[in-house]
Image (cartoon, rainbow, N blue to C red):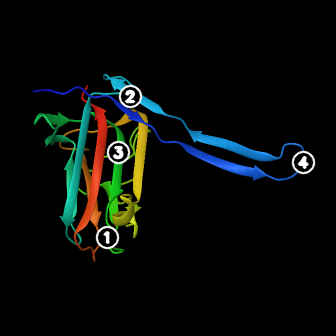
Amino acid sequence: MSSTFTASLDLSLIATELFTAGISRGPIRTPALSNIRMATGTSDGQINKSFYKRYTGVGASTTTSIDLVGSLTDTSGDTINFDEVVLIFIRNLSSVAANRLEVGPHSANGFGILAADRGIWKDVSDRNIIPSDSTADATGGGNFILWYNIAGVPAVGGSTDILAIITGASASAASFEILILGRDI
């Protein structure tokens, strides 16, 4: 079996300032992001690979290693090899305060380290923190990070292909979901 992938990012970031004096009174909207469409393909702005997984019950100080070349499979059971990663979305689904997530390159073969002006993190020690959300259970939400680059960031098997998601030292049954979009060129 094989799959074909397309994606759209429908996220609107709009700030509204209410101007209360002068002739131009009223709301002033400032759109910061428009909708993005990613067609099937292997060029900039396109994708042909997708990975999604929800992790539950992850213990304290646990490193979940996402090997972007060779160990992931799609819903058809086909092996996924990301040559370039275009989008990463990670949402912390935990409502317990200690269940923060630290996201960044793995200490061995770390993905996303800045090289040739393409990367997410400056070096192997850099991390993004995704705190838990006390309302996640009730709202179905949760704090998240979203990273997108139309050109993608290279993933090379055996050298720059492992993303690390690390739970807090006091974590208790942490839960999160991850979506990765990219290309196998």
C-alpha gap between disc 1 and disc 3: 20 Å
Question: Residue 6 appears in which quarter of the rendering?
Answer: top left
The span from disc 2 to disc 3 (Cα, nearest Å) is: 14 Å
Q: Amino acid at mark 3?
A: Ile
Amino acid carrying mark 4 in the image: Gly
Q: Residues within 10 Å of mark 3 (few under 14, many from 20)?
A: some
Amino acid type of the residue that numbered disc 2 sits on in the rendered structure? Met
> Which mark is drawn over residue 99?
1
At 34% from the left and 68% from the top, the residue drawn is 100
Q: Amino acid at mark 1?
A: Asn
Secondary structure state at the residue bearing disc 3: strand
Q: Nearer the viewer, mark 1 or mark 4?
A: 4
Q: Residue at x 25, y 57 (%)?
A: 107
Q: Is residue 34 above or below residue 167?
A: above
Q: Earlier in the sequence, mark 2 or mark 4?
A: 4
Q: Earlier in the sequence, mark 2 or mark 3?
A: 2
Closer to the chain start, of discs 4 and 3, is: 4
**Quarter of the figure that contains the N terminus:** top left
* Vertical order, 24 against 83 (above or below): below
Q: Is residue 121 in sight in this rendering?
A: no
The residue pinned by badge 4 equals: 22
- Mark 2, secondary structure of its residue: strand
Mark 1 and mark 4: Cα distance apart in space = 49 Å
- Which residue position holds label 2? 38
Q: Do residues under tags 1 and 4 come within 8 Å of each other at their CB atoms? A: no
Mark 3, residue position = 88
Q: Residues within 10 Å of mark 1 (few under 14, many from 20)?
A: many
Q: Secondary structure at mark 4?
A: loop
